[in-house]
Amino acid sequence: MKPKRILFLFSFIIRTVAYFARKKEGATIKKIGKMPKPPYILLSNHSSFMDIYLGLGATSPRRSYWVCAAEEFIDKYFVCVHSGIMPKRRFVNDPASIIPMMDVLKKKKKILVMYPEAVYSFVGKPLRIDEGLGKLVKYMKVPVVFLNCHGSYLRQPQWSDQVVRNVPITAEMECLISKSEIEGLSAEDIQKIIGNCFNFDEEEYQLQNHIKIDYPNRAEGLERILYQCPHCGKEFHMSSKGDTLKCDSCGVQYRLNEDGTLSCLNEETKFTRISKWFEWEKSNVEKEVRDGTYHFEDNVRMEKMEGVKIGFVPLEGEHHLTHDIDNGIIVKGPSGVVFHREPLQSFGLHIDYNWKGKGGLIDLSSPDETYFAYPLHKEKWLTKIRFAAEAIYDLKKEKIKK
């Protein structure tokens, strides 16, 4: 889509809403050094919707254009288009998406805002970013500014019941690469500079700033990401209630403390950090992939996005999804293969634990189509499927290099 002119009324309303949202949370944005004049690319880490309000504050009073997930346009197309928001399918290699970005930076000479991680952080730590970002910056020849947000994950982690916690929100804004520096840097150098900036750690931020989250149900939803018991090794037997995460197989219980640490209530504590437990699960999935034992399949409810103006339409009939090392993700319906995602199609896979109250889903996109697959029996597998998609991609890339 060619970017439309931003209407002043929409821009004013959105920025006003963002201003009061930041004021309500006491959010602060610190600018380090001198900021370049537009056009430039603003990159930011991403843990919750609060980061959008911070991005709007960082670019004010100037109007800016934003790269956004295509499904966010549904039911608000006109407002999005005339507010400088441009749709993009997640984790899809789509060279055509460069055209509207060029229009923003080269013709309109405005600010382009991007969230390279493409999804909310799972445990308040960086996720992998697209390997082509350095090439994009090198091609555009404009400065790069980084907005590092803190507290957004702690305020509203994506695995939770979505109740907002009372957490201080801060951000630092700094110019990473000036226009003059781009000429002397390779795309690989630029990629490395950008990658090094994504080093935030929300757990450490909580401890260093002595942030106490006393919300009584703060652990509810943790089983979505901490699905494997570190004591008995069983998967998908975890459950949560209040501030406690429990394995229903062996009975071990962990308490999520007010300072964000974990402590075992009836056995030896294996992990004191959510992120360490999360990384342990990831390493187990990587081992399954390399051993050739990983396999997932389930019946799914399928919906297809028929356009940002129409939205998602349910597909009739019974559909079956399989995910394995050799073939990637294949969805078969009554008339045969509906969707096929090759293992090397992308390093990332978008999942959602409860999209608009409709349940957990796997986002299946190509340059031309987007499907949402809702597992009917194995919804607890979502985090493991994402781990596996990355591990399979890495394994296939290694084999190609060899």
Image (spheres, rainbow, N blue to C red):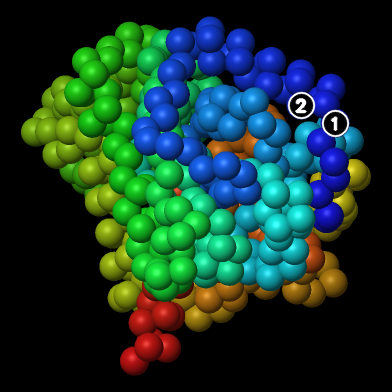
Residue 184 seen in this snapshot:
yes
Residue 176 relative to residue 86: left or right: left
Q: Residue at x 60, y 63 (%)?
A: 140
Q: Determine whether the residue tagged by mark 2 lies in a helix, strand or loop.
A: helix
Residue 11: image tag: 2
Residue 322 vs 33, above or below: the answer is below
- Amino acid type shown at disc 1: Leu
In the rendering, which numbered label is found on residue 181? none
Residue 235 in view (yes/no): no
How far across and down, in percent of the image, does residue 305 sit? Answer: 81, 52
Label placed on residue 7: 1
Q: Residue at x 76, y 40 (%)?
A: 84
**Residue 49 location in percent, x, y?**
57, 29
> Is mark 2 in CB contact (under 8 Å) with mark 1?
yes
Q: Amino acid at mark 2?
A: Ser
Q: Position of residue 139 (x, y in %)?
A: 58, 69
Asked if 237 appears above or below 215 in the picture, the reply is below
Rendered residue at 17%/33% (across/down): 272
Determine whether, in the image, residue 357 is placed left or right of residue 47: right
The image quarter containing residue 309 is top right
Image quadrant assignment for residue 192: bottom left
Look at 27% across and 15% down and name the residue there: 211
For the view shown, which residue lies furthest in the bottom direction?
402
Residue 150's quadrant in the figure?
A: top left
Q: Give above or below for 5 relative to 341.
A: above
C-alpha distance separating marks 2 and 1: 6 Å
